[in-house]
Amino acid sequence: MDTQQQTAAERQPVQEMLEARQETPEQIAREMLRQGDAMVTEAKSGIEDARKALQDAGDEAAREKLKLLEDELDAAWDNLEIATSHPETEEAETEIRDPWIDMLESLDKTFESGRYDPKMSRLMQTREGEQAFRQTLDEKISDKLKAEHLDFATLDRLKTLAQVDGKMREIIKSEFDTIVGPKYSERLLSDQDLRDDLESMLDKLSLPIGKDEKPLCRELGLDQLVLAYEMFGQDAPEAAKHMDLAQYSSELRVQRGEMLMSPQLDKTTGEMCGVISVNFDYGKNPSDGIMHRTFALNKIEKDGKPAFEKSCSLELISLPTNLKGKNTAKQEMAATNKFLKESGFDKEKLHANIDIGGYTWATLGFGWDVEKMRRTGEEGLSDIQIIKNFVTERTQNITMNLKDSGIDLEEPDIKPYMEQLQSMLKTDERAALITPQELAALGKEGPKFIWAVSGKRYRAEDYEPYRESDPPNPRFKGELHFGKLLLLGSDWYGQKQL
């Protein structure tokens, strides 16, 4: 079809009517619309034929161009209908020419229908149009990206706009920069696999869990999903699964499970940082079992340059009495640590609590996390002094408890261990070598003690007459050597490389 020739031919009767004044302006406008409608219909028919031919040929790029051409025809036709419907109204003409109103209307149309309006690209070349686009993005779209659950339809529409207009892409990317940083803003606009991974993560992390049947994650905005992806990749839901103690014991069932995400962009690098906390309760009371881990992605200094470190902190792990000693916790740690190492985590950290953890974690190879051990008022102390303070407190504790229990610290099988503790504290050079493992191993070949429910410590060989009246403390079962007695009930923070 020769569009230019047909257009000239169709124009002739209209020009003659105008010259002869045979028709009113309204009648002429209607005639123009009729002729225009016929031309648009024929043009779209030709486009459809071409699109089918390209589809058969497998040329997707050309098909997309034809689609944009068809959208432009629709937009042009809409404008023509509006213009000819109100030729006598100056107010209507002003509204049509107002880029601000046009942009707002076009944006609403785009985000309601999901179809791109080509008029927006033309309006983006004006200052008012660009301003309207930024305002709409800030007022209407940003909230959907940061909502309780990310609206993927909105994300997809922004990707479409970014692909068809360079100016829109620049503005959309700058908006993404403020939410997830430049590393992910670019990927969100071009990486379909990332977009699909994020949606899959949202679906899995939104599933109800436990007897309470509440979602594992209550908030999954764009920044929270990106933080989870940066920490764990697409396997973020597996992180929670590995930590669930019920996976390792048929006697446990989750009462409540929750994953809380706190994303934060590093101001100097624009990289995604933050903390993810995972909590599992296995009953309505703490004694029914608890698992609480925290994952952190923080900026550190490495060789004088900024770097990022992933670490996991085991905040609390508690099992019912009937499950202690059945390797449930050790199975969880082995599976979780393997997963974390594969996910690029550098360190595992923990709080050795006031129960058996103070001794147990020392035997599992954890060293000091001095910064977390530093108490209020100790900010100016050296790392060595912090460790010396801890050993001094434990020495005073075991001295008091053994004396109160009537045990003579000068007895030849006890005195050497008291002297070892004192020798560790004589110089900073010696104190710098102290490890939790050294403390835990003290006196393994020496005397054994029983910790009774009264709080009294007995020599194991002297205990039998007191067993009935003062039975063993169920928290600290069995015979305890000097180092175990020293660390049980201690409170310290540890860390080790994965």
Image: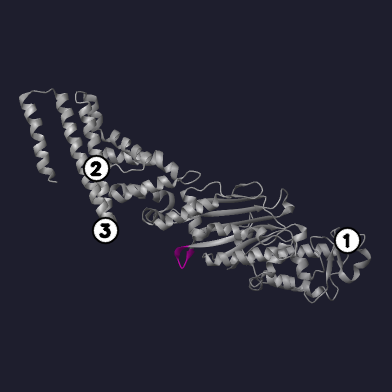
Which one is nearer the viewer's eye here, 153 or 322? 153
Q: Where does label 1 land, which residue?
A: 471
Q: Give the left or right position of residue 348, taking residue 157 as reference.
A: right
Q: Count the marks: how many?
A: 3
Q: Secondary structure at mark 1?
A: loop
Q: Where does label 3 land, which residue?
A: 57
State the residue at coordinates (32%, 47%). Answer: 161
Earlier-in-chain disc, 2 versus 3 = 3
Q: Position of residue 233 (x, y in %)?
A: 49, 60
Q: Quadrant of residue 19?
A: top left
Earlier-in-chain disc, 1 versus 3 = 3
Stretch in magenta: 301-307
- Which callout, 1 or 3, points to the residue nearer the camera? 3
Q: Secondary structure at mark 2?
A: helix
Indicate the quadrant containing the C terminus: top left, top right, bottom left or bottom right: bottom right
The amino acid beneath tag 2 is Glu
Q: Position of residue 60 (x, y in %)?
A: 29, 55
Q: Secondary structure at mark 3?
A: helix
| Circle 1 crowding by C-alpha within 10 Å: few under 14, some 14–19, many from 20 | some
- Which callout, 2 or 3, points to the residue nearer the camera? 3
The amino acid beneath tag 3 is Ala
Q: Position of residue 240 (x, y in %)?
A: 59, 57
Pointers 1 and 3 in contact (C-beta within 8 Å): no
In the rendering, which numbered label is found on residue 416? none
The amino acid beneath tag 1 is Pro
In the rendering, which numbered label is found on residue 72? 2
State the residue at coordinates (94%, 66%). Answer: 465
